[in-house]
């Protein structure tokens, strides 16, 4: 079981996620337990590139699939399965510890994913609209 503490719009939340089995997991948020279903995806080696989102919004330009995470650097990983709402940084941008890098929607809640250290964005491994699983690499800081 993994436990996470996060803040959304100034409100503190504590969530724990039990092991995912057959696409289902028990998730407890502030004492309330929910059974959630996750999307099944093929397990690929860490070096393999992530697939592009199935359907991009009509107004968004077509984006190439992100490259595989580079070796080295601080990897920012997804704390929960969900969908990327917004990517708020760009490669080469300097960031400070606590600065929001992207937003992840999980269980119908928007979660700010922040830098855990000062650094420069070496690689962005996801795009808006992409579905991610827990522990997927989102951003690499150098």
Image (tube, rainbow, N blue to C red):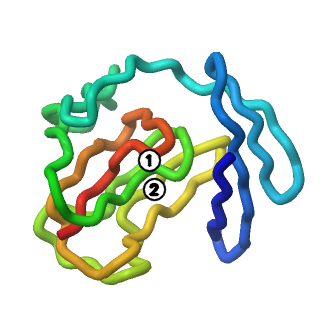
At a point 37% along the width and 71% down the height, the residue shown is 115
Task: Report the side of 2 relative to 70 (left or right).
Answer: right
Location of the C terminus by quadrant is bottom left
User: Secondary structure under badge 1?
Assistant: strand
Residue underneath mark 1: 85
Whether tag 1 and tag 2 are in contact, CB under 8 A, the answer is yes
Tally of numbered tags: 2
Q: Residues within 10 Å of mark 2 (few under 14, many from 20)?
A: some
Quadrant hosting residue 18: top right
Q: Residues within 10 Å of mark 1 (few under 14, many from 20)?
A: some
At a point 69% along the width and 44% down the height, the residue shown is 17
Residue 83: image location, x then y, percent: 47, 39
Quadrant hosting residue 92: bottom left
At a point 19% along the width and 78% down the height, the residue shown is 94
At a point 18% along the width and 39% down the height, the residue shown is 68
The Cα atoms of the two marked residues, 1 and 2, are separated by: 5 Å
Q: Is residue 8 visible?
A: no
Residue 99: image location, x then y, percent: 39, 77
Q: Is residue 130 above or below residue 28?
A: above
Residue 72: image location, x then y, percent: 17, 60
Task: Report the side of 111 relative to 90 (left or right).
Answer: right
Quadrant hosting residue 14: bottom right
Residue underneath mark 2: 103
Q: Earlier in the sequence, mark 1 or mark 2?
A: 1
Task: Report the side of 60 relative to 3 (left or right).
Answer: left
Q: Is residue 119 visible?
A: yes
- Residue 104 numbered tag: none
Q: Is residue 16 above or below residue 46?
A: below
User: Secondary structure under badge 2?
Assistant: strand
């Amino acid at each position: 079981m993994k436990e996470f503490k996060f803040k959304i719009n100034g409100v503190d939340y504590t969530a724990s996620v039990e092991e995912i089995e057959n696409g289902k997991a028990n998730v407890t948020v502030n004492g309330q337990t929910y059974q959630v279903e996750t999307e099944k995806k093929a397990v690929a080696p860490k070096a393999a590139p992530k697939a592009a989102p199935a359907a991009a919004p009509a107004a968004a330009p077509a984006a190439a699939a992100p490259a595989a995470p580079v070796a080295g650097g601080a990897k920012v990983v997804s704390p929960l399965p969900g969908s990327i709402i917004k990517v708020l940084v760009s490669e080469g941008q300097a960031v400070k510890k606590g600065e929001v890098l992207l937003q992840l929607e999980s269980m119908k809640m928007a979660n700010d994913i922040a830098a855990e250290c000062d650094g420069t964005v070496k690689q962005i491994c996801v795009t808006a609209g992409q579905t991610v699983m827990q522990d997927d690499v989102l951003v690499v800081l150098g």
